[in-house]
Amino acid sequence: MKKLTLDRILQSQGFGTRKWCRQLIDAGEVSVAGAVIDDYRTAFDTTGLTFRLFDEDWDFHEHVFLALHKPPNFECSRKPSHHPGVLTILPEQFTWRDVQPVGRLDHDTTGLLLMSDHGPFIHTQSSPKSHIPKVYVATTADPVTPELVALLLAGVQLNDEPAPLAAVRCSAVDSHRIEIVLEQGKYHQVKRMLAAAGNHCAALQRVAIGRLTLAGLGLEEGEWCYLDAAELALLVAGE
């Protein structure tokens, strides 16, 4: 059991400063279990807590773990430079509570992107030492050949890498699409590997992380969802 006063609850969920949250409570904007709470000092057990604010119901989350189907032309940065940031797709309170992308997808790459405010989770998911596979489907300019697949599995040399980089798994999807599984997260890695193997990446989508799949989440481009315990358990290394 963890009890917090209502102003601290709202602040922890990203609804603004404590002063602003107290003003919302004083104005009768917050209700719990159907009752308006106008005293910010009222304390609640946060386990399973749901409160209503701005005519919406909100579940308390000590930390948030999100999946976003990233559309094209969004940057995975809290300080984007040329395109809108992915945080603009989410409700504003996630910015207040310091939610950030887990790793990065290029602005023109689409697909599964994790986001969280939990530092250890972000570190584990981002570290190549965790060996969590990321699955990509690339559309290629030239046909996918057995030779291309073999080269990517054997390893290709990139200009700024000391040793060749190889796909963990690789297979043709159809004549111009190839599935590539990586455990690293090098800069533009899929695109550069395809170029080094003599092809060109025309479009790229991340379709899975570990055993968590974009198809399984059922998200359309631009949609997001909270990840539950069972879905988080799929974000592991191995088959």
Image (cartoon, rainbow, N blue to C red):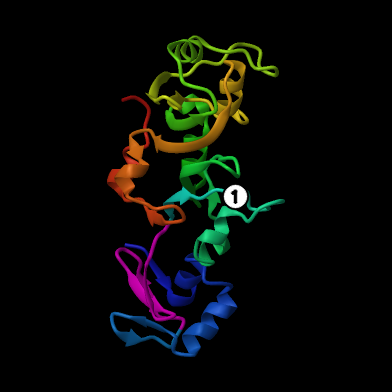
Furthest-bottom residue in this view: 27
Q: Quadrant of the C terminus?
A: top left
Of residues 184 and 72, the one nearer the viewer is 72
In percent of width and height, residue 161 lies at: 66, 17
Which quadrant of the structure image shows residue 235?
A: top left
Q: Point out residue 54 in the picture as x, y percentages from the top left corner.
A: 44, 80
Residue 29 covered by magenta stretch? no
* In magenta stretch: residue 58: yes
x, y (%) of residue 227? 36, 50
Going by the image, does 239 lie left or right of 23? left
Three-letter code for the amino acid on which mark 1 is drawn: Asn
Residue drawn at x 28%, y 80% is: 33
> On the rendered structure, is 8 left or right of 196?
left
In the image, residue 22 sits, relative to residue 213, either above or below, namely below
Q: Residues within 10 Å of mark 1 (few under 14, many from 20)?
A: some
Looking at the picture, does residue 140 appear above or below residue 119?
above
Q: Which residue is mark 1?
A: 73
Residue at the image point whose x is 57% and y is 13% from the top:
156
* Image-quadrant location for residue 159: top right
Q: Quadrant of the N terminus?
A: bottom left
Q: Which residues are the magenta region?
A: 40-62
Please say if 126 is above or below 231.
above
Q: Secondary structure at mark 1?
A: loop
